[in-house]
Image (cartoon, rainbow, N blue to C red):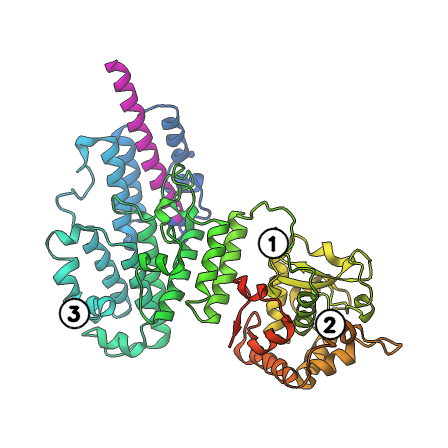
């Protein structure tokens, strides 16, 4: 039984060694690639740059997978090659590299924890190293200035003794910097002005905008590297994935972006735990869960959709629109689409919903197919049989989104072109944004895929100018009246809508899109009331954006 226990312990130890080694070499190849030392982030390239004649890095990993314990000399050799060749170029990441080597030595040779060039008893705290690196970044830009702890305290905590009284005092300097605190530092460095920055630092009289922007980039980049290095026992990022912590960069970026927009709205950094409460999303920001198979994923389709419903109440529309795009980009990256039945919303076929969709999409897309710039003819609105080839279709932009009746998630197309849009969510969204942002330059997609793109784009610009100058009623009359004088848009979708004050509201809506560069319409409540005609679900669905 003792032999079995010993074997089990050996397997567990080797597993820890292998994970620590993988975490180290993955970090090194990404770091050296980012610093342009490696031509590609691969084990083979890392081995070559360290002077090995074969894929040494991968070979050692394979050896451990086969159950072979590494020798101390193996890791000593790796460390010495790295230190001799590149450590001077990697000074900003030195602390993280040192910590990862120490972790590897701890798991591998418990009695040799002090075998590196700097023993554990001689090392300063991780916190001390963190703040020293921040000071070093700033000093690089002001070589004649001294940078003090009090300066960093004022920058990050707005009081001169913050580091001395807490973070670097006694045993506090060995405690983990919480993720909320690191996000706080990112917020402060992103939002500090040139005048504030100069006032925070004793020996710095002035800083120009360009120099401050470089400092912002370098400080935030260092903080991100620190987070992904997982220097503390309690991890910032899950590190059990075989591709290392960097695999979870999308989760980190989405978390930081949402948190930052919420903090901007509050005009101060907020705690991650408070963000969870506001979003009603208890796993928000728990990115250390990633890579742990027994814990599941932090972000899911349902969770993100519910989060967006709360987020719209918390941030300005410009921030919400930015996050909305980033959430859908993340969903695409992680393929989080639910496999849903193709069931439409109960209000999808109601007359009031259809009226609202048609009028609003004509305003937004000018009655031109989103992919081809071909006009959607007036006759297509005459027939009601939705399978007729010459009818219009309301196309859901996103996969498995049939339950949505949010006009911002739809495009208006001819039935014959309906399936051409399938699987092109990002392209369609990009073209819609370019249109609403009133670009004059023709998007590259049209140039590459439409033979007579110049004529079609010129026609698009003419329609846009006409709508802005003359309003929706004249626009529909001009472009949707057929040769026989019939206008099926007026007849079927616009006939019961009063055209006095709503006409002015729609003109104002267009001007807002122009002046505020919005990527999606914010609908005036008066327009909603008139166009919805008793379809409150469009508002309560949580996706339609409107203002009172």
Q: Earlier in the sequence, mark 2 or mark 1?
A: 1
In percent of width and height, residue 420 lies at 72, 55
Q: Which residue is mark 2?
A: 493
Measure how far apart labels 3 and 2 are at the Cα level. Answer: 65 Å
Specify whether residue 305 is painted magenta: no
Which disc, if any, is residue 160?
Answer: 3
Image-quadrant location for residue 510: bottom right
Q: Residues within 10 Å of mark 1 (few under 14, many from 20)?
A: many
**Mark 1: secondary structure:** loop
Going 37% across and 53% down the picture, which residue do you hit? 285
Tell me if residue 380 comes above or below residue 41 in the rendering: below
Give coordinates of residue 463: x percent, y percent.
72, 78
Q: Which residue is mark 1?
A: 401
Front label number (3 vs 1): 1
Query: Residue 181, percent across and down?
Result: 27, 59
Q: Distance of mark 2 from mark 1, alpha carbons? A: 24 Å
Q: State left or right for residue 494 relative to residue 321.
A: right
């Amino acid at each position: 039984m003792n032999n079995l226990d010993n074997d089990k312990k050996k397997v567990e130890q080797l597993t820890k060694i292998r994970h620590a080694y993988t975490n180290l070499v993955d970090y090194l190849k990404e770091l050296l690639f980012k610093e342009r030392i490696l031509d590609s982030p691969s084990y083979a390239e890392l081995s070559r740059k360290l002077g090995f004649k074969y894929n040494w890095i991968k070979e050692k990993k394979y050896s451990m997978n086969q159950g072979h314990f590494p020798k101390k000399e193996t890791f000593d050799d790796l460390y010495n090659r790295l230190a001799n060749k590149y450590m001077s170029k990697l000074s900003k990441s030195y602390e993280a590299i040192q910590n990862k080597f120490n972790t590897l030595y701890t798991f591998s040779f418990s009695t040799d924890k002090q075998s590196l060039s700097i023993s554990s008893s001689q090392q300063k705290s991780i916190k001390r190293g963190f703040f020293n690196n921040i000071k070093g970044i700033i000093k690089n830009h002001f070589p004649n200035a001294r940078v003090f702890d009090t300066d960093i305290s004022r920058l990050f905590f707005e009081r001169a003794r913050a580091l001395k009284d807490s973070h670097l005092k006694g045993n506090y300097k060995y405690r983990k910097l919480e993720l909320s605190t690191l996000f706080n530092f990112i917020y402060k460095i992103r939002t500090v002005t040139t005048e504030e920055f100069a006032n925070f630092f004793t020996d710095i009289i002035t800083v120009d905008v360009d120099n401050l922007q470089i400092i912002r980039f370098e400080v935030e980049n260092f903080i991100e590297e620190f987070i992904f290095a997982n220097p503390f026992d309690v991890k910032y990022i899950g590190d059990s994935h075989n591709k290392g912590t960097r695999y979870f960069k999308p989760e980190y970026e989405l978390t930081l972006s949402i948190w930052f927009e919420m903090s901007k709205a509050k005009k101060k950094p907020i705690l991650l735990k408070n963000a969870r409460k506001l979003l009603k999303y208890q796993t928000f920001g728990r990115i250390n869960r990633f890579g742990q198979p027994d814990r599941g994923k932090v972000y899911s389709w349902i969770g993100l959709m519910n989060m967006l419903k709360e987020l719209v109440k918390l941030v300005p529309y410009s921030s919400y629109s930015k996050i909305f795009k980033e959430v859908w980009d993340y969903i695409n990256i992680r393929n989080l689409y639910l496999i849903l039945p193709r069931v439409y919303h109960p209000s999808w076929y109601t007359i009031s919903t259809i009226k609202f969709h048609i009028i609003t999409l004509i305003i937004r897309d000018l009655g031109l197919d989103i992919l081809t710039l071909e006009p959607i003819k007036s006759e297509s609105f005459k027939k009601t049989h939705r399978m007729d080839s010459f009818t219009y279709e309301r196309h859901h932009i996103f996969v498995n989104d049939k339950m949505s009746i949010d006009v911002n998630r739809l495009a208006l197309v001819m039935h014959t072109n309906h399936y051409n849009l399938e699987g092109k969510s990002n392209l369609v969204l990009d073209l819609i944004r370019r249109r609403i942002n009133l670009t004059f330059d023709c998007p590259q997609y049209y140039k590459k895929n439409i033979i007579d793109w110049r004529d079609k784009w010129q026609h698009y610009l003419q329609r846009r100018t006409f709508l802005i100058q003359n309003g929706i009623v004249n626009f529909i009359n001009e472009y949707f009246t057929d040769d026989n004088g019939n206008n099926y848009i007026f007849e079927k979708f616009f006939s019961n809508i009063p055209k006095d004050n709503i006409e002015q509201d729609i003109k104002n809506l267009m001007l807002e899109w122009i002046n505020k560069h919005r990527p999606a319409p914010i609908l005036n409540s008066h327009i909603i009331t008139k166009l919805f005609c008793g379809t409150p679900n469009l508002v309560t669905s949580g996706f339609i954006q409107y203002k009172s």
